[in-house]
Image (cartoon, rainbow, N blue to C red):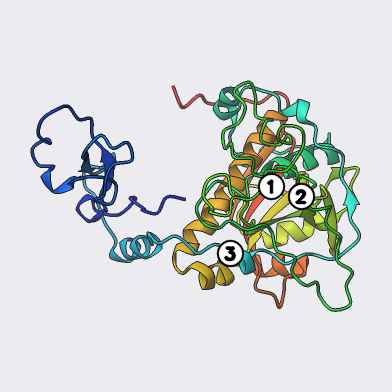
Amino acid sequence: PPTVATAAVPAAARPTATVPAARTSGDAPAGAADAVGDGASGGPSPSGAGPVTELRVRYPAFERSRQVRRFPAVTAVHRAAAMPTRPAPGALADAAPRRWPGDPVALPEPALASLDRPLSTVLASRSSSFGRFRRPPELTAAELGTTLAFAAAGRTHPADADSVADPVAPSPAGADPVALPPADAAPLGSRTGTAEPHPAGITASVREPGDGAAAAPDPAGGPGSGGPALTRLWVFANHVDGLATGSYAYCPRRHALLPAGAAPEGGMSAFLQQQYFLTNYTMGQVGAVLAVSGRLDAVLDAVGPRGYRILNAEIGAVAQRAYCAATAQRIGCGAVLGFDNVAMDEALGLTGTDERTVLFLLLGRHPDAVADLAYRL
């Protein structure tokens, strides 16, 4: 993620960025004398062509409000989280989610053909379901698995946060951990060094790179590196054709679900409705609820206040990719925060751990014929 947060920070207080300036023969532009140097750090320029002029510029926010209200606490949080220092390699290795034990439940292979739609079309047509779920027909295990695979591929987004592979953490006492594939096997959606989807569709970031070999982690970190995923995806399977009702942890390396809990007493629909505080969704019409979890305290211990931004960036990437995958498959998706996190964590078996659910994504079907307001016009 970028190291400077500009939202809610006054322009005068925001750090400036240094960029090379176009230069002709002669003196440096007026006002830039203090930014002139022989190189990026004052030494000779890499090309040996003489001094390189740099300009310090500010990026003002586009503000449309007549009157701007600023909150000191929000500004202080943004400044604290905008730590410019880069974490040391491996700093986040111990902040990744622990391996989850259990016998894997296989999912159908991701249906990449269903994702092969122009990205511009997907982005223009995506929207939150907001209470429009209707069943039957049911959400299928193939649609669920495809959405999980595409969403999980966004967990290792290009950033300078870390540069090591996912750690192999010890499993709980007495539990048999799920074996990972060989080291030379490419995990689905592994970072390949290209962050943009294929121009012809949105499937490229789910496919394996080149001949299927995994991209080697960049020891220096940064874009294209193979840092650890800081989040985990969970599934509350409610009405999914081909999948037993219950809660599961998603294992992207095996593209499988690991059981986390049986169906609650009284049924999954009743449990989800009881734990949801709002009234805009009827859980009996929802096919599945995805939960995104992370270990916030461990991330903060590793990189300090900037961990809020690093973790939230990954959560946002996962959510946006889930929306895109659902839209491409013509199923509904809605992100919500209105669940009782304590009860949801308990249902997933997270009580007594430092892992917490932070965001929920509802999946299901929409009616074929619905009225809509084209408010963007």
Return the disc, 3 or 2, that comes first in the chain's sequence: 3
- SS of the residue at dot 3? loop
Lateral position of residue 274 relative to residue 315, left or right = right
**Residue 276 visible from this viewpoint:** yes
Disc 1 from disc 2: Cα separation = 7 Å
Disc 1 + disc 2, Cβ < 8 Å? yes
Residue at position x 9%, y 34% from top?
27
Q: Choose top left, top right, bottom left or bottom right for residue 143.
A: top right
Disc 3 from disc 2: Cα separation = 21 Å
Q: Amino acid at mark 3?
A: Gly
Return the disc, 1 or 2, that comes first in the chain's sequence: 1
- SS of the residue at dot 2? loop
Between 207 and 307, the one nearer to me in the picture: 207
**Residue 63 visible from this viewpoint:** no
Q: Which numbered tag is attached to residue 252?
A: 2
Q: Amino acid at mark 2?
A: Pro
Between 177 and 347, the one nearer to me in the picture: 177
Lateral position of residue 347 relative to residue 332, left or right = right
Q: Amino acid at mark 1?
A: Ala
Q: Which residue is mark 1?
A: 152
Mark 2, Cα crowd under 10 Å, few <14 / some 14-19 / many 20+, is many
Tell me residue 84's x, y (percent).
37, 59
Disc 3 from disc 1: Cα separation = 21 Å
Q: Which residue is mark 3?
A: 90
Q: Choose top left, top right, bottom left or bottom right for residue 175.
A: bottom right
Return the disc, 3 or 1, that comes first in the chain's sequence: 3
Tell me residue 295's x, y (percent).
62, 67
Above or below residue 35? Residue 370 is: above
Tell me residue 104's x, y (percent).
89, 55
Lateral position of residue 24 relative to residue 226, left or right = left
